[in-house]
């Protein structure tokens, strides 16, 4: 069994400069994991924050599983992220007092069958950095077309 990537947050790679990456587990209900396996996930505007020394993901939308019946789930509920204690301390120490935030980069199913999410500590890019990235991308395209 191999890793199956469900979705990626392409907007995060453009909007933010990535400082550090982590892989975290997610606390889910039965219908949520089935929806994730079907690919019904959207976390474009989501972010993670600390609450009682635990990391929670807010804004991640997991669509309703159509065969779940009456025991469905709330698509926009906050999900707890599972990380080791020393990773949580490191993330908290990096973020405190600095202009950093935590955003999800991708969601995937691991080799063991669990849903995992790749999160990153990021810093917002300036407008001129975004323009520079667009310029570089266009130059690469032109270069590849000429060859």
Image (cartoon, rainbow, N blue to C red):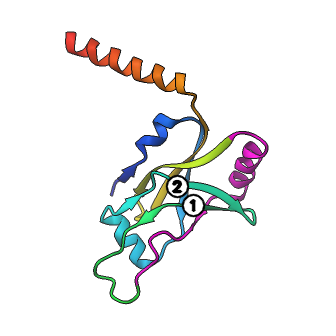
Please, is residue 100 above or below residue 26 in the view? Answer: above
Residue drawn at (21%, 9%) of the image: 146
Q: Which residue is mark 1?
A: 57
Q: Does the magenta run of residues contain 76?
A: yes
For the residue pair 86 and 13, the one nearer the viewer reads as 13
Q: CA distance from mark 1 to mark 2?
A: 7 Å
In this rendering, does residue 3 appear at all?
no
In this rendering, does residue 93 appear at all?
yes
Local secondary structure at mark 1: strand
Q: Which residue is mark 2?
A: 46
Query: Do labels 1 and 2 touch, CB within 8 Å?
Result: yes
Spot occupied by residue 88 in the image (x, y as percentages of width and height): 70, 54
Residue drawn at (37%, 90%) of the image: 70
Q: Locate the N terminus and report the quarter of the image it occupies.
A: bottom left
Q: What range is drawn magenta here?
A: 72-99
Local secondary structure at mark 2: loop
For the residue pair 83 and 133, the one nearer the viewer reads as 133
Residue found farthest to the front: 127
Spot occupied by residue 40 in the image (x, y as percentages of width and height): 34, 63
């Amino acid at each position: 069994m191999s890793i199956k990537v469900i979705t990626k947050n392409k907007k995060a790679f453009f909007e933010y400069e990535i400082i550090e990456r982590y892989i975290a587990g997610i606390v889910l209900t039965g219908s949520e994991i089935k929806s994730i396996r079907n690919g019904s996930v959207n976390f474009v505007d989501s972010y993670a924050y600390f609450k009682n020394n635990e990391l929670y993901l807010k804004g991640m939308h997991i669509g309703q599983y159509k065969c779940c019946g009456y025991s469905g789930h709330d698509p926009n509920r906050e999900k707890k992220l599972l990380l080791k204690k020393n990773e949580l301390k490191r993330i908290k120490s990096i973020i405190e007092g600095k202009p950093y935030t935590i955003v999800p980069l991708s969601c995937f199913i691991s080799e063991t069958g669990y849903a995992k999410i790749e999160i990153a500590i990021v810093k917002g890019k300036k407008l001129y950095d975004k323009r520079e990235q667009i310029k570089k991308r266009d130059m690469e395209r032109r270069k590849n077309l000429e060859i």
